[in-house]
Amino acid sequence: MKDMIRRAAENLMAAKRVVALTGAGISVESGIPPFRGRGGIWERVDPMVFGHIDTFEKDPETVWRVLIRDLKTIIDRAAPNDGHKGLARLEAMGRLKAVITQNVDGLHQAAGNTEVLEFHGTCALQRCMDCGGRTPTRDVDIARLPPRCPCGGVLRPDWVFFGEAIPPEALRRSRQLAAECDLMLVVGTSAVVHPAAYMPVIARDAGALVIEINPERTPLTGVVSDYLIKGGAGEVMNALISELEGMR
């Protein structure tokens, strides 16, 4: 892996506009389970029932009890890991412009990244279904379900339920960033959920270098990405930051 880290560091030093695309794999090290795959949330909860906006609108209490309450507890306790911190350090070093994420945990912002495009919204905030006001999830009292806004409206995660559209501005800006970058880091995503998984394709088609950081191969490997650094996000990002700092 050492040679691959060196190669990635050299590519990052040469790049002018670097963008990262992240998925659930970067947050697993913070104790947040993925939605998909082995051990994922959708193994125990039917996504097209409890993850669908129609179910929430009809029975918010049940969706809070079955799905959102436990996830809120996990995210409340979670902290950025070395993967998140590494991307924040890349930004502080002037090497990373923005993060496009499929995650809803808010950990990129907590780590220090300033431009974070959240494809699927966030569970770090709750939005009132009546007044539209937003409340930090940590501050929401879940002694009674569903929790309510001071105005009396039901609170819901400020994320994208099944049956809802990707936020148009997040999609527009992500496409713009992908088309304008000259290097894209793909970190901790299986690259099977669209339209987020199409961002590396946009980057590649515009002439960007695409580097994967993942424990295993993905549909991008050898097809879209230029090379894969196998390993956990925290381990690889620590090695990459160390190599970059040595170059400076």
Image (cartoon, rainbow, N blue to C red):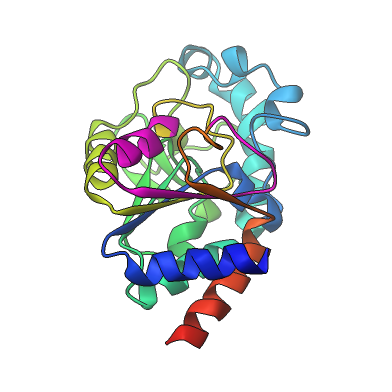
Whole-percent x, y for residue 100 in the image:
39, 47
Residue at the location (51% across, 65% down)? 7
Give, as a single range, the part of the protein colored magenta: 197-219
Residue at the location (55% across, 70% down)? 6
Whole-percent x, y for residue 14 in the image:
33, 69
Q: Is residue 80 visible?
A: no
Whole-percent x, y for residue 240 in the image:
55, 70
Whole-percent x, y for residue 93 in the image:
37, 78
Residue at the location (64% across, 41% down)? 71
Q: Quadrant of the N terminus?
A: bottom right
- Which of 139 and 160 lies nearest the eye of the viewer? 160
For the image, the number of numbered tags is 0
Q: Is residue 29 visible?
A: yes
Residue 179 in magenta stretch: no
**Residue 166 in which image quadrant:** top left
80 above or below 57?
A: below
- Which of 43 and 19 lies nearest the eye of the viewer? 19
Left of 63 or right of it: where is 182? left
- Which of 220 and 96 lies nearest the eye of the viewer? 220
70 above or below 1?
A: above
Residue 212 in magenta stretch: yes
Residue at the location (34% across, 22% down)? 165
Q: Quadrant of the C terminus?
A: bottom left
Left of 43 or right of it: where is 69? left
**Residue 175 in which image quadrant:** top left
165 above or below 240?
A: above
